[in-house]
Image: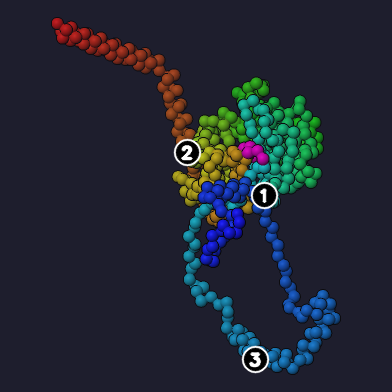
Amino acid sequence: MSESKIPAQCPSTGLIQSGKNEAKHNVKKSTKTVLKLVLMSDRAEYTSSGINHVEGGWPKDINMNDPEAVQRYRRKIEKDDAYIHAVMHLGHGMEHNILQNNAIDMFESYYSDVPEIPPVEKSSCHTVNVYREPGARRPVRSLSWQADGGARFAAAHADVELMRSCRSSQFSYIWDIENANAPELVIKPPQPLLDLQYNPRDQHILVGGMMNGQVGWWDVRKGGDPAGLCLPHVAHRDIVRNVLFINSKIGAEFFSSSPDGVVKWWDTRNMSEPTDSMIIDIVKSATDTQNIDNAIGISALEYEPTIPTRFMVGTETGLVIGGNRKGKNPLEKLPSKYEAHLGPVYALQRNPTFLKNFLTVGDWTARVWSEDCRESSILWTYSHRTKLTDGAWNPIRFSLMLVTQWDGCLSCWDLLRRRSAPIVTAQLCDEPLLRLRPHEGGLLVACGSSKGTVYLAELSQNLGTADKNDKQLLTHIFDRENKRERILEARMRELKLKMRQDRDGGPQNQENDASTNDRDLEEATAEYVQTISDLQAQQKSQSN
């Protein structure tokens, strides 16, 4: 177009924007993209750093690491008249303050004779850290704390199916409680581990039981590969649910249990064969022979180091059986039996202070038993709406029971405060909690869920410490409940004996009772026939 055809216009001024125009839907789309990128970003890792300032400010040309230069500068300042006058001026005020402090007792207590009011107890439980399994989300099968108050715990993961097939990862992990970003060490067994326990004497040694029935041990100083495994033909015939170290001179012996109904003892120095084994088969006489075909599957295992030859097992049928490794015949090897629960016993542990009392968890209840009462438990919880999965005593506050539930709750039962309901119930997660293990310090509790997550919970101070009178009070409770149950057991035995005597003692009474029952039956039959006849006659009259 030529310039002559362009119409002449008056000059004008205006504001323009050089930015790119965006439609409303484009802005929303870009916002969603940014949010998606933020949500899919990796977890931020933080490190703590600081500086230690131990020397005052010096001129720029003075090297404080040179003692001679520092001393020369200090002598130069001290010879200055202004420095001398400043010190003399400040000295009078400082001397006055020193004399005043010497004349007054700064730490005097004006109300020492007034008795202290005990603080109001506030029981609580909250999550302080969460440790998620890298990759697969397999259920947590076992938790074990490092001995001597260590800051590490071992978590065993396994996805147990009906066919015992391994579909996912086989690794287990060791975590440092201060670092939840990644595990400190990855344990690499040939098969998934169902139990992994620290050696109470050596913090670097662990033992574990695997899904194919083998047991092995690991030395964390050498990495995550097993340091020793038992041979397949001497292993258990089913999965290994429990492994525990026993009290030995060297600390290298442990024993394992399985649903095949056999308990085996091992030595980490020679894993070619077990050192001993015992079949959990209850016999009626000392001359009977235990048979592996009649063995009862084991679901829980308990061992107390102060009683080295004795142990206890919880079975899949709800029984708790006491064992004696040094027994000479089958009756001495399995001397006691308790009918604890309607289903498998998920947890079994002796009280750390009162060794005759032990805790069991199964079906919908948790129960406290005494070795002196075999007919029934002395204390028990109410039947929960959800299944209970695990339980343990607090190692410091020995009156506190910790119980995990299928709905993701951690319940704290204090026998000295309230026995009708838990003192605290904390909802740690939405998925089921399967395992728990309290720390030796008493304030921390590790709980493992069905999705492979370990929740570290912290108890309040009053739930993790014991008072000076707690032992005496709990002794009175156990003695009173134990005495009550023994009285009830004696009364029940008397009633059963009386019923047996009445049943077996008088044949004349039996004949009289039989004739009386026959007469009543004849009268009832005649009355029934008469009623039917009356109804039939009434129907005929109505039809006519």
Q: How crowded is mark 2: few (under 14 residues within 10 Å), some or many (20 or more)?
A: few
Is-magenta flag for residue 442?
no
Q: Would residue 425 be found to the left or right of residue 177 on screen?
A: left
Q: Would residue 485 be found to the left or right of residue 35 on screen?
A: left
Q: Where is residue 116 in the image (x, y as percent from the top left)?
A: 49, 67
Residue 263 is drawn in which quadrant? top right
Of residues 180 and 278, the one nearer the viewer is: 180
Task: Identify the residue position indicated by label 1 in the image.
Answer: 181
Residue 239 is drawn in which quadrant? top right
* Main secondary structure of the magenta stretch: loop
Q: Which of marks 1 and 3 is nearer the N terminus?
A: 3
Of residues 298 and 42, the one nearer the viewer is: 42
| Residue shown at the point (80%, 44%) measured from the top left | 222
Residue 59 is drawn in which quadrant? bottom right
Residue type at mark 1? Asn
Task: Identify the residue position indicated by label 3 in the image.
Answer: 92
Residue type at mark 2? His
Task: Identify the residue position indicated by label 2 in the image.
Answer: 384
Check contact, mark 1 vs mark 3: CB within 8 A.
no
Q: What stretch is highlighted in magenta?
A: 135-142
Circle 3 SS class: helix
Of residues 51 and 129, the one nearer the viewer is: 51
Q: Is residue 483 visible?
A: no
Q: How many marks?
A: 3
Q: How crowded is mark 1: few (under 14 residues within 10 Å), some or many (20 or more)?
A: some
Circle 1 SS class: loop
Q: In which quarter of the image is the C terminus?
A: top left
Residue type at mark 3? His
Q: Which mark is residue 396?
A: none
Q: Position of residue 89 (x, y in %)?
A: 66, 92
